[in-house]
Image (cartoon, rainbow, N blue to C red):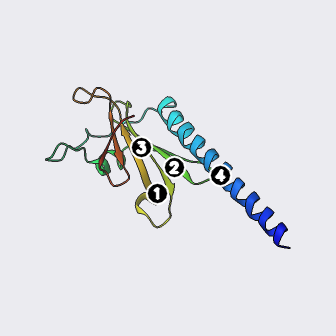
């Protein structure tokens, strides 16, 4: 019975690793889809910039946005400006009790005049390096 239990534990561990890889790939695919499939929406004001130069991410991503969720609970949210251009993308995990029903893991903003390579932020809204 001990051998069977170890085999089951090993198989369970392998399945968890495979699920992590699948979720990671779906995360990237969701972000890519959000950037490619851009629906035209209107009525979003310009992003608010806080006094210390960091964009107000809540204002950006609570205006006009399109959100997709996959079967594993990964959420991709794309924000748009008034002309329908993509402003940025947030990636997170579905959490019913969290604000907007998601826990944000990363936020990416499109390049602009001040940030020609764009910007990245962690789940807490702190600037993160672009790799």
Task: Check whether the beta carbons of the residues at disc 2 and disc 1 lie within 8 A of each other.
Answer: yes
Label 4 sits on a secondary structure element that is helix
Residues 106 and 88: in front is 106
Q: Quadrant of the N terminus?
A: bottom right
Q: Earlier in the sequence, mark 3 or mark 4?
A: 4
Residues 44 and 20: in front is 20
Tell me the number on the disc at residue 17: 4
Please name the residue that numbered disc 2 is placed on.
Answer: 75
Q: CA distance from mark 3 to mark 1?
A: 14 Å
Residues 18 and 103: in front is 18
Q: Quadrant of the C terminus?
A: top left
Q: Which residue corresponds to the image point at 50% horizontal and 62% vertical from the top-left?
A: 95
- Residue 107 at x, y percent in the picture: 38, 44
Label 3 sits on a secondary structure element that is strand
Q: Nearer the viewer, mark 3 or mark 2?
A: 2
- Residue 129 at x, y percent in the picture: 33, 39
Q: Nearer the viewer, mark 3 or mark 4?
A: 4
Classed neighbour count for the residue bearing mark 1: other residues with Cα under 10 Å, few (<14), some (14–19), many (≥20) = some
Q: Which residue corresponds to the image point at 35% horizontal and 50% vertical from the top-left?
A: 62
Q: Which residue corresponds to the image point at 43% horizontal and 51% vertical from the top-left?
A: 105
Q: Nearer the viewer, mark 3 or mark 1?
A: 1
Residue 9 shown left or right of residue 22 in the figure:
right
Q: CA distance from mark 3 to mark 2?
A: 12 Å
- Residue 94 at x, y percent in the picture: 52, 57
Q: CA distance from mark 3 to mark 4?
A: 32 Å
Q: CA distance from mark 4 to mark 1?
A: 23 Å
Residue 115, by quadrant, is top left
Tell me the number on the disc at residue 65: 3
Q: CA distance from mark 2 to mark 1?
A: 7 Å
**From what the image shows, is residue 9 above or below residue 65?**
below
Tell me the number on the disc at residue 102: 1
In the picture as drawn, the residue positioned furthest to the front comes out as 3
């Amino acid at each position: 019975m001990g051998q069977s239990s170890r085999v089951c534990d090993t198989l369970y561990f392998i399945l968890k690793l495979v699920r992590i890889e699948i979720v990671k790939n779906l995360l990237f695919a969701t972000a890519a889809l959000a950037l490619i499939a851009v629906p035209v929406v209107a009525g979003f004001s310009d992003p608010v910039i806080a006094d210390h130069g960091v964009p107000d991410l809540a204002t950006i991503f609570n205006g006009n946005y399109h959100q997709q969720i996959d079967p594993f609970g990964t959420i991709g949210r794309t924000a748009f400006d008034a002309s329908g251009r993509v402003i940025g993308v947030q990636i997170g995990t579905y959490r019913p009790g969290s604000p907007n029903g998601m826990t944000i893991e990363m936020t990416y903003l499109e390049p602009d005049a001040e940030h020609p390579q764009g910007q990245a932020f962690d789940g807490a809204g702190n600037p993160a390096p672009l790799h």
